Image: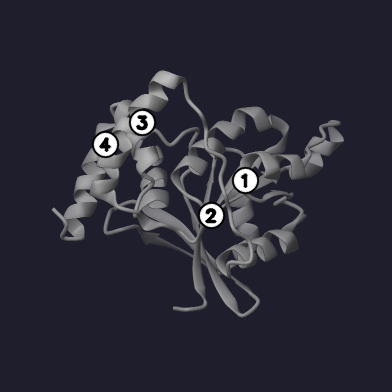
Amino acid sequence: MGNEYRIALAGNPNTGKSTLFNALTGLRQHTGNWAGKTVSLAQGSVEFKNKTFQLIDLPGTYSLFSNSKDEEVARNYIVFEKPDVTLVVLDATSLERNLNLALQVLEMTKNVIICINLIDIAENQGIEINERLLTNRLGVPVIKISARNKIGFPLLLDTIDRIVTGAIECHPAQLQYPEEIEQKIQQIEPEVRKIVGNQVSARWVALRLLDGDQSLLDEINRQLVLKGVS
């Protein structure tokens, strides 16, 4: 529907991702199977400015390299289901460790919001986080929140709204790899783009191919068959 948008929540375990999901959706939750598979994802909705944001709580993972079923489910949802916005929930008290997942998501999709959760606990520990600097460095909105105390929710919902309406354009920073890897990416990327078109980030797929990610190849083949491209 025209006023409904899908918002995926990704994050490491124990970052408060599900707490954020529960706080935003309240009792408007259900569990449904995803993409015809037996994997169940928690889903819920929140109303904002005459729009319905359908939230999907992805499995908590430390990475999206498909080393486990949870990682594969989270990765495939972001890449192939194409949520309108992906929220990456980070722990403000362990920001450096959590940023690894955020950087992976930024390589996969464009419309991303970085939610730095547990900001009240971090501030009590004397931790200061410059969200404006992070926004400039990462190229996507960075918002400090406390899911438990609902701090930052109005700004978060307004930012989601501004992204889905086009008022905010995200330009995720592109990680630069050693020259040898960058050269290989440049060689592979055009060929990948011929296969996946603009449906998936060709650069990201090229990186995963260089890493020998067989499960991604299998999923791309499956998606192509579903779309009748093969």
Identify the residue position indicated by label 2 in the image: 111
Q: CA distance from mark 1 to mark 4?
A: 29 Å
Say which of 165 and 48 sits in front: 165
Q: Is residue 84 above or below residue 28?
A: above
Identify the residue position indicated by label 4 in the image: 215
Front position among marks 1 and 4: 1
Q: How many residues crowd mark 3 within 10 Å: few (<14), some (14–19), many (20+)?
A: many
Residue 99 position within the rendered picture, expressed as x and y whole percent measured from the top left = 60, 34
Q: Residue at x 38, y 39 (%)?
A: 203
Q: How many residues crowd mark 1 within 10 Å: few (<14), some (14–19), many (20+)?
A: some
Q: Amino acid at mark 3?
A: Ile
Residue 75 position within the rendered picture, expressed as x and y whole percent measured from the top left = 40, 44
Q: In the drawing, what numbered circle is on residue 185? A: 3
Q: CA distance from mark 1 to mark 2?
A: 10 Å
Say which of 57 and 172 sits in front: 172
Q: Earlier in the sequence, mark 3 or mark 2?
A: 2
Front position among marks 3 and 4: 3
